[in-house]
Amino acid sequence: MPSLVPFALRRLLRGLLTVWFAVTVTFLLLRLLPGNPALAIANPNMTAGMRAQLLRQYGLDQPLPVQYGKYMWQLLQGNLGISFTQSTPVSTVLMERLPWTLLLTGTALVLTVVIGIPLGVVAATHPRGMLDRFVQIGGVTAQSLFVPSVGIFLLFVFGLNLHWFPIGGAYDQGTYGAAWYGSVLRHLVLPCLSLVLVQLGSYVLTLRSTLIDSLGEDYCSLARANGLPNRKVVWKHALRNALLPTTTLIGLQLGFLVGGAVLTETIYAYPGVGRGIFEAVTELDFPVLQGAFVLLAATVVMANLVTDLAYGLLDPRVRTS
Amino acid sequence: MTNSMTTSLDPTTAIETLSPATDPTAAQATWGALRRNPLAVLAFVVLGLLTLVAIFAPVIAEYPAGFGPDVLQPPSSAHWFGTDNLGRDVFAEVVYGTRISMIIAALSSALAIAIGVVVAVVGAYFPRIDPAVGTVVDLSLSLPVLPLMILVAALVGPSLTTIVLVIAFFSWPEVTRVVRSQALSVVRLPYMDAARLMTTSNSWIIRKHLVPAVAPVIAVSVVLTASRAVLSAAGLAFLGLGDPNSWSWGRILYEAQQSGAMSSAWWMTLFPSLAILALVLAATLLALAYNDARNPRARKD
């Protein structure tokens, strides 16, 4: 059986490489694209001397490799720069927001799996049945949904008309203890549901098709021939093998989920990184935009690493790949 | 429901068979199966209608500009989709939005396909380049693309050109991923060796033998990339990064959200949302139906 340690090291290296890639791409984009961040904040009628001073202040008058070195060195120390508009370090601004985004996307991810597995199993074990038809039509439709459309629809129906859930923010002011947790939960429902609805389609469809393939394999026929109840064949044998490709899919979709969170948080004024991005866009606060991307990229890499390691622990086949 | 959507539901990884697309009988069989699939026909009709709306927008509606006296009116016979917070006709906004959305989808997917296919086939054909291509694609695909698009669009300033370039620049890795996996299995086939015996021109082999062999994957990829481009463009416009000088579906939603009209005027958000859904869903169905039609095992003929 392949050992877990080299596998874990390989994945860790890969994660670090991805973060380096993200950071370098952002650096190059910001420095090489026509819109220079220093010129963007510069007042059009400032003198050449003032502009030069501003460039010096942000270190933008130095050669590119030197800038890159300084940028990397500061990043390693957790320094993402100073926000243009709030005059506080970007890392402080974003770290206050990150937990909310993690709560939102994490809950959406767990709910997708928890709802998706039973749906996929029923659809795969009753192909061409009523529920299977529904799963297929619903799945393809859900894949084509625009996240803000879903968010606005849920907000309009369940927030504004039925008053079941709050329409914005992450918690009620002035609540403490259990009441606070309750309000956090109620504020989470609609944004989370928007993400789940969009995410669920491809998850269920992938699970369904891989499960149908697994159920046709010899080991499933053998298990049935041995007189194992069908329920056990499906849940204990076929499903376990079908979960591998679906878990890979989740890893691939994390970036998409984060993008969805940016849009959902904007609609619900949810105080996460995504809403921060929206506010930074309207104020053209480039350090925050850059920091938010780096932070979200690192989060996605971390989440991928954790899923990979957990899966490598459960399934030895993964370790060799 | 017929036999559609039964074999494979992830349209990007669905193609397993390696039947040469240049074979006229295979192409005819695919086309025949496609025409017999009601969902494919429906998708064609929807895409055709939207294309007509995009082309004939000035004939269908007057360009929504300036202010009107009827503010936030619900749908009526005068304003089919109601009016927005400045009294502009939402129907006209959606009609002109169709135009911009389809232009962005067509241009950015064409660009993304061109880059993605070239990178994929060159990588697959030259084994020394391929690991680098694979790594770059894997790394790009594991990053959250929307925040990156936002950063670039905000930096360069929103315009039609910016949006097309930004979407194309961040969409080609997905094209490369799909085309590359198919191209890698094609270059191992004996006929590629035979082609190498006939000529020393690598570009000739790539153009005449490799690209035609992966053409079906490219066809699916065109449709899916275009539909994802629609969603990306709408997402950027919804965050205020759309072209401020032209109407797009995302911009209608952005204005509904910014003005607070979203909470009362459901027509301002429902109709552009339906337009996005119609376009993306039709494209997805077409890609699925095409995959099914190409697969002789799923075909009943």
Image: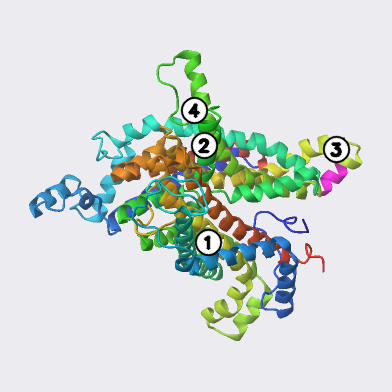
Q: Residues within 10 Å of mark 2 (few under 14, many from 20)?
A: some
Q: Determine whether the residue tagged by mark 4 lies in a helix, strand or loop.
A: loop
Q: Residue at x 74, y 78 (%)?
A: B25
In space, the residues marked 3 and 1 are separated at their CA atoms by: 43 Å
Q: Residue at x 75, y 67 (%)?
A: B36
Residue assigned mark 3 = A230
Q: Residues within 10 Å of mark 3 (few under 14, many from 20)?
A: few
State which quarter of the image contains the C terminus of chain B. bottom right
Q: Main secondary structure of the magenta part?
A: helix
3 or 2: mark nearer the eye: 2
Residue A3 covered by magenta stretch: no
- Which amino acid, by three-letter code, is at mark 1? Ala
> Residues at badges 4 and 3 in contact (C-beta under 8 Å)?
no
Subunit ID for the residue under disc 2? A
Disc with the residue nearer the chain's start (2 vs 4) = 2
- Which amino acid, by three-letter code, is at mark 2? Phe
Q: Residue at x 57, y 60 (%)?
A: B224
Residue B281: % across, % down: 61, 55
- Bounds of the magenta span? A217-223
Residue A49: % across, % down: 8, 52
Q: Determine whether the residue tagged by mark 3 lies in a helix, strand or loop.
A: helix
Residue A228 lies in quadrant = top right
Tag count: 4
Depicted A221 relative to depicted B12: above or below: above
